[in-house]
Image (cartoon, grey):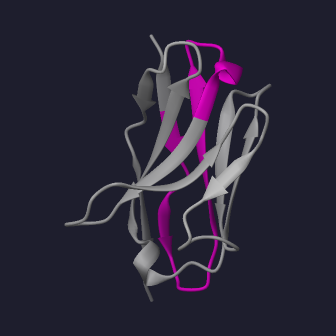
Amino acid sequence: QVLFVESGGGLVQPGGSLRLSCQVSGSVFSRYTMAWYRQAPGKQREMVATITSAGSTNYADSVKGRFTASRDNAKSTVYLQMNSLKPEDTAVYFCNGRSVLTDRNYWGQGTQVTVSS
């Protein structure tokens, strides 16, 4: 069974930082293109960042320069470092993995990030 488990969400003041983690088990991590998505109340889920197995990244315009995605293939973990957080970053953040072999998508359970003073 392939599992994606996020951690690291919480409440932070505007301008603060958080680091999300997503650990993958049950499969070969390097075979996945990883991504972070988020979904705010009443809004559609949107892509935040993607990172290939080789470490190439892509970001939504709204987070460029503030968020950084990285991965540690030895630890089967992907990270999202979020700096200069804004209230509009408040959302449930989801880890996503797409198998480069099967094109199948997997999702974590989500972790809440709330940016508020």
| Residue 115 in sight from this viewpoint | no
Rendered residue at 52%/83% (across/down): 13
Rendered residue at 59%/13% (across/down): 27
Q: Is residue 74 left or right of residue 81?
A: right
* Position of the N terminus by quadrant: top left
Q: Is residue 110 positioned above or below 18 on the image?
A: above
Tell whether position 8 is magenta: yes
Rendered residue at 43%/82% (across/down): 87
User: Which contiguous range is marked in magenta?
Assistant: 5-33
Where is residue 48? Give x, y as percent.
Answer: 52, 58
* Position of the C terminus by quadrant: bottom left
Q: Is residue 17 positioned above or below 76 on the image?
A: below
| Residue 47 in sight from this viewpoint | yes
Where is residue 58? Give x, y as percent.
Answer: 65, 54
Where is residue 6? Give x, y as percent.
Answer: 51, 41
Tell whether position 31 is magenta: yes
Task: Determine which quarter of the picture holds residue 78.
Answer: top right
Where is residue 79? Give x, y as percent.
Answer: 66, 47
Rendered residue at 63%/80% (across/down): 84
Q: How many marks?
A: 0
